[in-house]
């Protein structure tokens, strides 16, 4: 590849690099517009809270799943315990068994 072609490719890459590294087109346009009450401070706060929501949502869902599993297991164990105690009261003990 000729020397001038390498320079041209490098120049194009450097010119396009900021656009390629932008988070998303909506964020880039929103920052450029600046049409928010409170100026840029409210925009940054909005991004902050949206990021917190996106990060915390999977943890909340997994936590709810584990809570439901634990509650179902607790109910199942309570049902088994009550059924076994009921069965022990209904069935007489074998002869010679101590209580």
Image (cartoon, helix red, strand yellow):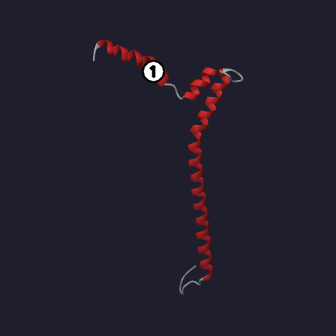
Q: Position of residue 97 (x, y in %)?
A: 54, 83
Q: How many numbered discs, if any?
A: 1
- The answer to whether 98 is drawn above or below residue 78 in the figure is below
Q: Nearer the viewer, residue 68 or 23?
A: 23
Residue 85, x across and y down, in percent = 61, 74
Q: Quadrant of the N terminus?
A: top left
Q: Residue at (61%, 69%) from the top-left corner?
A: 79
Identity of the residue drawn at 57% across and 24% down:
28
Q: Position of residue 40 (x, y in %)?
A: 65, 21
Residue found at x 43% / y 17%: 14
Q: Nearer the viewer, residue 78 or 36?
A: 36
Is 59 in front, or is 83? Answer: 59
Give the vertical position of 86 relative to 38 (above or below). below
Q: Give the x, y percent position of residue 67.
A: 60, 53
Residue extending farthest to the right is: 37
Q: Nearer the viewer, residue 19 or 89?
A: 19
Is the residue marked by circle 1 packed among few (<14), some (14-19), or many (20+) residues within 10 Å?
A: few
Please give left or right for residue 1 compared with residue 76 in the image. Answer: left
Q: Quadrant of the C terminus?
A: bottom right
Q: Residue furthest left?
A: 1
Q: Secondary structure at mark 1?
A: helix
Q: Which residue is mark 1?
A: 17
Tell me if residue 2 comes above or below residue 84 in the rendering: above
Residue at x 60%, y 56% (from the top left corner): 68
Q: Residue furthest top?
A: 4
């Amino acid at each position: 590849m000729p020397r001038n072609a390498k320079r041209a490719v490098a120049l194009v890459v450097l010119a396009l690099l900021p656009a390629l590294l932008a988070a998303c087109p909506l964020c880039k346009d929103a920052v450029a517009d600046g049409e928010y009450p409170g100026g840029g401070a409210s925009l940054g706060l909005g991004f902050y809270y949206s990021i917190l929501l996106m990060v915390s949502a999977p943890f909340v869902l997994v936590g709810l799943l584990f809570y439901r599993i634990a509650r179902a297991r607790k109910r199942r164990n309570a049902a088994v315990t009550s059924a076994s105690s009921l069965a022990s009261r209904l069935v007489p003990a074998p002869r010679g068994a101590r209580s």
